[in-house]
Amino acid sequence: MRASDDDRHRVVAALQRHTAAGRLTLEEFTERVGAVYAARTLNDLAHVVRDLPAEPAEPPPSTADSGGRQLLVAFAVAIVFLVLVGLIMALR
């Protein structure tokens, strides 16, 4: 089955949580995010997170860590942007 943009966003969010928990290095995170955005099927997405523990369906809400979470999201967006710029430059 083909993967949607929402499916890709969910996997990237999971990768962010695994990186924050120390399961992935920033280099691994960057590589996997690139694989997520290149994925065409749900099976391709599952392959990216196959070696990581399963997560609860919804992470519990935390108001105490919202500033840290926002910083992590901003950092992840910056990493994704750098990966995409790198890919574009490599293709030229």
Image: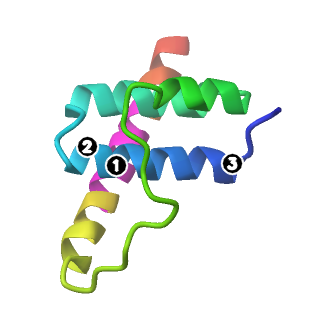
Q: Residue furthest top?
A: 91
| Residue at 27% from the left image edge and 86% from the top image edge | 63
The amino acid type of the residue labelled 1 equals Gln
Classify the position of the N terminus by image quarter. top right
Task: Give the answer, above or below, for where 86 lies relative to 76.
Answer: above
Residue under the image location 58 percent in, 33 percent down = 37
Q: What numbered label is drawn on residue 5?
A: 3
**Residue in view at x 59 percent, y 31 percent:** 45
Residue drawn at x 39%, y 52% as measured from the top left? 77
How far apart are the two marked residues, 1 and 2, measured between alpha carbons?
5 Å
Tell me, yes or no, whether the two marked residues, 1 and 2, touch with CB atoms within 8 Å.
yes
Tag 2–tag 3 contact (CB < 8 Å): no
- Where is mark 1, residue-wise? 16
- Residue 86, magenta (yes or no): no
Residue 33 lies in quadrant: top left
Residue type at mark 3: give it. Asp
Image mark for residue 19: 2
SS for tag 3?
helix
Query: Mark 2 or mark 3, which has the lower sequence index?
Result: 3
73 or 56, which lies in front? Answer: 56
Q: Is residue 50 visible?
A: yes
Type of residue at label 2? Thr
Q: In this view, does 89 lie above or below 68?
A: above
Q: How crowded is mark 1: few (under 14 residues within 10 Å), some or many (20 or more)?
A: many
Segment tinted magenta in the rendering = 74-83
Task: Left or right? Give the position of 50 relative to 5.
Answer: left
Question: Badge 3 local density, few (<14 within 10 Å), some, or many (20+)?
Answer: few
Upstream in sequence: badge 1 or badge 3: 3
User: Distance from label 1 to label 3 (Cα)?
Assistant: 16 Å
Q: Position of residue 3 (x, y in %)?
A: 74, 38
**Can you name the residue that lies furthest to the right here?**
1
Observer-nearest of 30 and 21: 21
